Amino acid sequence: MKKLCELAVIFFKMGCFMFGGGSAMLPLIQQELVDRRGWLTREKLMDYYTIGQSTPGIIAVNVATFTGYARAGVAGAIIATFALITAPILIILLLANILTVYMNNPYVMKAFTGIRIVVIALIAEAVCGLWKTAVKEKKDILFFSFALLMALSGISVIAIMCIFCCISLFLGYKRGWK
């Protein structure tokens, strides 16, 4: 029960700062779950990000589900997921009417411009942190470069992931995985 309560509090707190979507939450998730609590290693968090990106839904919600499951089974997954999404749902419900009225206000528009820039910076910081964990060999830089070029050229994220999954499986098989 203590683990479930702890999951609820931590993920509700993170959900209160879920501005910019799941990717913008990556630095907060890393700080809270890896650095502060030690619930996950950087490698395990990278695995959760990877799976979270490969499955439907918001990365942060998927990571919450995986973390909750690892900490307290199915009940932990449910609690962590709902705790994370509760605050954003409440905030959206409260602000939806207000924002529609004031969205064209120049001050509100400037505030959102500032928030967008901060979200980009947070995502860039998360990418830099993930880079240290994910990129360990020269082939990783090559994979990253090709995947980035493919993404910038407009190729579907799903297609890119499938292509590199197949390449990784092939390379692993060639190295002796059976």
Image (cartoon, helix red, strand yellow):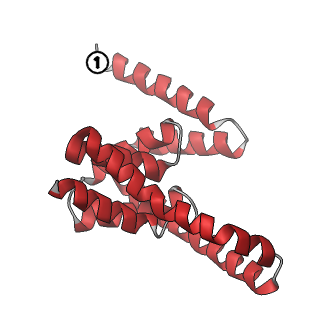
Q: Residue at x 65, y 71 (%)?
A: 95
Amino acid beneath label 1: Trp
Q: Position of residue 2 (x, y in %)?
A: 16, 58
Give me the residue at 35% from left, 23% from top: 172
- Above or below, 66 relative to 12: above
- The answer to which quarter of the image holds residue 10 is bottom left
Q: Nearer the viewer, residue 42 or 96?
A: 96
Say left or right for 154 vs 55.
right
Query: Quadrant location of residue 20?
Result: bottom right
In the orientation shown, which residue stands out farthest toward the left? 2
Q: Nearer the viewer, residue 23 or 58?
A: 58
- Residue 100: horizontal and vertical position, in percent? 77, 70
Residue 28 horizontal side relative to residue 74, left or right: right
Q: Secondary structure at mark 1?
A: loop
Q: Is residue 123 visible?
A: no
Task: Name the residue: 49% across, 42% down.
Answer: 53
Please name the residue that numbered disc 1 is placed on. 177
Answer few, some or many: residues within 10 Å of disc 1's Cα (few below 14, many 20 plus, some between 14 and 19). Answer: few
Can you say which quadrant of the picture contains the C terminus?
top left
Count the marks: how many? 1
Residue 39 x %, y %: 21, 55
Tell me the residue at 54%/33% (across/down).
Answer: 161
Q: Is residue 81 visible?
A: yes
Looking at the picture, how far across and down is residue 114, in whole percent? 66, 79
